[in-house]
Amino acid sequence: MQGDLLPIVIGSIVGGLFGGILSIVILWVMSNKAQRTYPALSIPVPNGARYSPDFELWAQLNKYRRTGENCFTKGRGLLTSSTEIRFHGNEMEIVEVVNFLFAKRRFAINAPVMFGKPVRRHKIKQINKLLEHWQCPPIEFGKPSDGLRFNRYTACTASRLKIFFRRPAV
C-alpha cells in the first residue's frame, strides 16, 4: 500500500515545482515586457496636491504608507506586486512594482497586461476617486490595440490624456 502512493507523491511534488517555476518565468517575461512598453504613468495634478490634507486622508484610508519624501507605497511586494505613487512637482507618477526578490520590475498601473488586473483595477478605481476630487481626468485601462505609450519624462496635459485613453470615433 505504501509503495503504491510513492509515485503519486513524487509526481505531485515534481508537478508542483514545475508549475511554480513555469508561473514565475511567465510572470518575469510579462513584467519585463510591460516595463519596456509602459514604464510609468504620469498625471498632472494641482499645485501642492502632495501636501494636501485630502491626499493624506486618502492615502491613510487606502493603506498607502510613506516610504520616502515624495513616495507612497501600498503592499509589501514580496513575490507579489505593490503600487508606488511618487510626486515630481505638479505630476503624480503611478507604477506597479513586481518584486522577484532579486529584481524589481516597474510598469504603469494601467498597462494592459493580464496578471493582477482585478487588483490593479480596484486600485485605479480608488485613485480615480482622488483624481475626481482634484478635478483631473480619470485613469482608464489601456488596451494593446490602442497603441498607448507612456513616457516617464514628459508631462501629459489633460487634453493629451483624453487622446491617450479614448478610442477615436469611427
Image: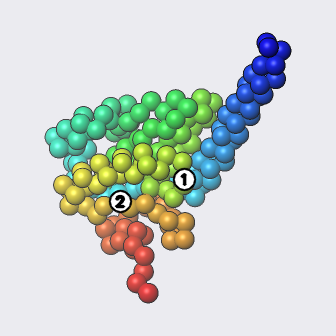
Q: For this view, does 84 lie left or right of residue 15? A: left
Q: For this view, does 134 lie left or right of residue 104? A: left
In depth, the one of 130 and 13 nearer the eye is 13
Query: Residue 145's spot in the image, x, y percent?
Result: 54, 71
- Residues at discs 2 and 1 in contact (Cβ within 8 Å): no
Q: Which comes before the other along the chain, label 2 or label 1?
A: 1
In depth, the one of 113 and 109 nearer the eye is 113
Query: Residue 36's spot in the image, x, y percent?
Result: 60, 54
Q: Which mark is residue 125?
A: none
Q: Residues within 10 Å of mark 1 (few under 14, many from 20)?
A: few
Figure quadrant of residue 67: top left
The residue that appears at 35% across and 51% down in the rendered structure is: 124
The residue that appears at 35% across and 59% down in the rendered structure is: 139
Residue 86 visible in this rendered orientation of the protein: no
Q: For this view, does 2 lie left or right of residue 155? A: right
Could you give the CA–CA distance between mark 2 and mark 1, rounded to whole angstroms? 17 Å
Q: Which mark is residue 114?
A: 1
Does residue 95 sit above or below 19 in this rendering? below
The residue that appears at 65% across and 38% down in the rendered structure is: 24
Callout 1: helix, strand or loop? Answer: loop
Classify the position of the N terminus by image quarter.
top right
Query: Residue 142's spot in the image, x, y percent?
Result: 46, 63
Callout 2: helix, strand or loop? Answer: loop
Figure quadrant of residue 74: top left
- Identify which amino acid the numbered label 1 is placed on: Met
Q: For this view, does 54 lie left or right of residue 161? A: left
- Identify which amino acid the numbered label 2 is placed on: Ile
Q: Residues within 10 Å of mark 2 (few under 14, many from 20)?
A: some
Classify the position of the C terminus by image quarter.
bottom left
User: In this figure, what is the number of numbered marks?
Assistant: 2
Q: Which mark is residue 139?
A: 2
